[in-house]
């Protein structure tokens, strides 16, 4: 019995919404990378569905950081504006 190698990871292209949003989430200083991944998912879900406020999406992500949720929301909002998502 042999083990197959894992499937290759296919990255999103730079111009997709998913990549832009996860890049924004990666800019937020967090204690663990999983916090940034969770933030990226919550931001993407908010962007697609537009339910609630951006601050609610940041709160739902539960990012553990030395920054406050208000400051994280400001960072995300300004980054989304510069990338043309807002």
Image (tube, helix red, strand yellow):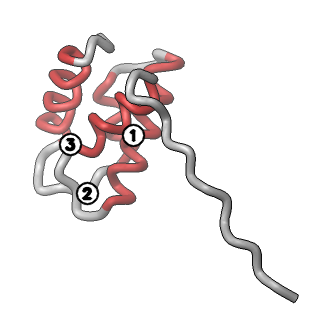
- Residue furthest to the right: 1
Of the two numbered discs 2 and 1 in the rendering, the one whose residue sits closer to the viewer: 1
Q: Which mark is residue 64?
A: 2
Quadrant (top left/top right/bottom left/bottom right) for the C terminus: top left
Q: Residue at x 19, y 55 (%)?
A: 65
- Residue at mark 1 to residue at mark 3: CA–CA distance: 10 Å
**SS for dot 1:** helix
Q: Mark 3 touching mark 2, by CB under 8 A?
A: no
Where 8 falls versus 84 (above or below)?
below
Q: Residues within 10 Å of mark 1 (few under 14, many from 20)?
A: many
Q: Mark 1 touching mark 3, by CB under 8 A?
A: no
**SS for dot 3:** helix
- Residue at mark 3 to residue at mark 2: CA–CA distance: 14 Å
Q: Earlier in the sequence, mark 3 or mark 2?
A: 3
Q: Which mark is residue 27?
A: 3
Residue 73, horizontal then vertical, whole percent: 20, 31
Residue 44, horizontal then vertical, whole percent: 45, 29
Residue 70, horizontal then vertical, whole percent: 15, 34
Q: Earlier in the sequence, mark 2 or mark 1?
A: 1
């Amino acid at each position: 019995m042999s083990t197959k190698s894992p499937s290759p990871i296919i990255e999103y292209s730079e111009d997709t919404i998913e990549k832009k949003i996860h890049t924004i989430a990666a800019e937020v200083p967090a204690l663990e990378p999983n916090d940034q991944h969770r933030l990226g998912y919550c931001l993407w879900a908010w962007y697609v569905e537009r339910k609630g406020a951006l601050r609610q999406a940041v709160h739902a992500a539960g990012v553990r950081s030395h920054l406050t949720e208000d400051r994280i929301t400001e960072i995300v909002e300004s980054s989304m504006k510069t990338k043309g998502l807002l």
